[in-house]
Amino acid sequence: MRKLICAVALSLPLTGLNALELDADSSVLNFVTIKNDSVAELMSFTSVSGNIDENTGKATLSVDLSSVASGIDIRNDRMREHLFQIDLFPNAVYTTNLDMAELNSIGMGEQKTMDLSGELSLHGKKAPLKFNVLVTKLSNGSFNATTSAPSFINANSFGLAPGIGKLRSLAGLAGIDLVVPVTFSVVFK
């Protein structure tokens, strides 16, 4: 019986052994909102996760939308309820495919610029999204990827414009821009 259990256990897929995992404590995802055409505010998400499959190069970054951090509690609550509708759409997920040979060619302490072409799934919709990143191989073998310029997310592409309109109305604002710049610095190890 013991041999059978060992044989079954050895035949199961070995998940996680060939993946780089996102280090949430060393990673940050920021976005900027513009209200009334003149006031910019930096916001972030405090809960991100992800991995890179070292065999296929598929990279995934998942954002817990309930972790939005705008610096104002009531605004966070309103964004969760009216913009992101976290009861229906709790996460945003970005997927891309990496050239693992190119990534693994980076020497310890070296940097390389990479262009990521992927897909963002947000609020029940999907749209292409590109990022230009600077990848650094750290001394412990981890990889840090930092955007070299912001990418822009258009609320209309994800059906978020009505939620932004609701936020504008609740806050008594003349306007909130529908295009949002996004930056990140993430570590995979």
Image: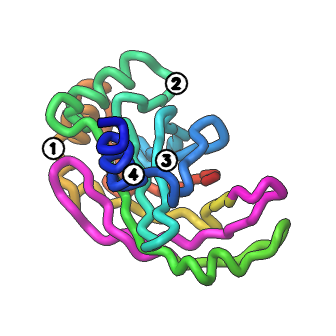
> Which amino acid is tagged 3?
Phe
First-in-chain label (1 vs 2): 2
Residue 168 colored in magenta in the image? no
User: Residue 113's spot in the image, x, y percent?
Assistant: 66, 78
Sort mark 1 into few (<14), some (14-19) or many (20+) by Cα contacts within 10 Å.
few
For residue 151, above or below residue 165: below
Q: Which quadrant holds the N terminus?
A: top left
- Eyeballing the image, is 1 above or below 37? above
Crowding near the residue tagged with mark 2, few <14, some 14–19, many ≥20 C-alpha atoms within 10 Å? few
Q: CA distance from mark 3 to mark 4?
A: 44 Å
Q: Are marks 1 and 4 in contact (CB under 8 Å)?
A: no
Crowdedness near tag 3: few (<14), some (14–19) or many (≥20) residues, C-alpha within 10 Å = some
Give the residue type at disc 2: Gly
Q: Give me the residue at 42% from left, 63% from top.
A: 152
In space, the residues marked 3 and 1 are separated at their CA atoms by: 19 Å
Q: Amino acid at mark 1?
A: Pro
Q: Earlier in the sequence, mark 3 or mark 2?
A: 3
Q: Earlier in the sequence, mark 3 or mark 4?
A: 4
Identify whether 113 is placed above or below 75.
below
Task: Name the residue carrying label 3.
Answer: 31
Q: Is residue 54 left or right of residue 125?
A: right
Q: CA distance from mark 1 to mark 2?
A: 23 Å
Q: Which residue is mark 2?
A: 71
Q: Earlier in the sequence, mark 4 or mark 2?
A: 4
The stretch of residues the image draws in magenta is 116-142
The residue to which callout 4 is attached is: 10
Give the residue pinned by disc 1: 162
